[in-house]
Image: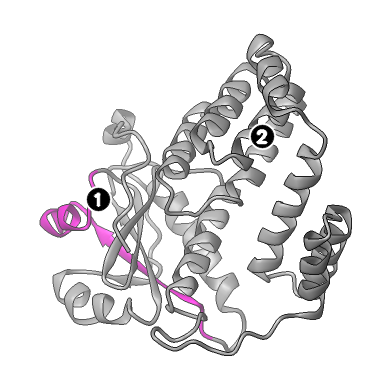
Amino acid sequence: MPPLPKNFSQAIDLGALAKPANLPENLPGLALDQTSIIGQVIPESNTKVWIVVGWSARSTNTTTLLETMAAFHQVDKGENIEAPWNLGTLNVDAEPQLAKALQINTAPTTIAIIQEQVVPLFESLPPVDQIRLVIDRVLALAAERGVGDGPVAGVIPEEVLEPEEIEALDAMERGDFAAARDAYKKWISRKPAEQMAKIGLAQAELLLRIQGLDPIATIKAANEDASNIESAAKAADIEISQGLNQSAFVRLIESIKATTGDEQKAIREHLLQLFELVDPSDPDLIKARGMLASALF
């Protein structure tokens, strides 16, 4: 799995230099150094995802990010079970060479380590829902490669489909996207954490939205009236369906910049739905996450 390109700008919060972060008394996760990275994290990354937060006491966002990641780790861990990912922290001021080797160029920065590969996730402090989304997508990506709860690498397991999945796939095959959507919703209702059901639902809903639309006319209308968020959303749907991810993301992010309140919320939620349809390793998606964060703050 090739490393992902960096996705956020390299801006540094200069105000943080005068306001050192009020760090938690006990940092969450495992405090990392070269020994633990080489001896523990890298070997374990072949069977379990490591998510590492590069932090600095000079950054005002450090405390919030560490607390957020710790909370998500605790939620995923639950009671008396092991979390599906490990959390590590790296003091970039104390370990500058190690930070550089891990492609951590500013703080805070969050990366994943999967199968001995560094996967940049985000810099600074994205909205909480984006952080959750990134974690879920990373776990799904890792599972596809046999890391974590996915199949063991090199072994092809017998595929067992859920009843709602069979129902949804049959509906998709006959072009009944509404029935497919309803089947995926039933699957999610029974298994709220099922990632494949969420992806299937997003696909079915996209197909419903673009059904009957003229692609050329829809994109032309959106280009002619950039202030119309409904036209922008339809055009972005068409573009995603055609594999034009960058165009779709940029279009909606520009709409987010130009709107406020409920309109901005609606277009942002639409953008997040489209994010669900794209591989988390896609460079356009990585870049779009950074653009979205910049547009919102």
Q: For the point 42% across and 38% down, which residue is it?
A: 287
Q: Which residue is mark 2?
A: 238
Q: Secondary structure at mark 2?
A: helix
Residue placed farthest to the front in the image?
Answer: 174
Q: Which residues are magenta?
A: 82-105
Specify the quadrant of the image occupied by residue 71.
bottom right
**Residue 21, above or below 296:** below
Report the side of 253 relative to 273 (left or right): left
Q: Does 32 sit above or below residue 111?
A: below
Residue located 55% across and 44% down the image:
127
Amino acid at dot 1: Ile
Distance in Å between CA atoms under marks 1 and 2: 36 Å
Residue situated in front as seen by the camera: 141 or 217? 217
Q: Which mark is residue 104?
A: 1
Give the residue drawn at x 65%, y 67%.
Answer: 196
Q: Is residue 169 left or right of residue 77?
A: right
Total number of numbered labels?
2
- Residue type pointed to by label 2: Ile
**Residue 198: image location, x then y, percent:** 69, 61
Q: Residues within 10 Å of mark 1 (few under 14, many from 20)?
A: many
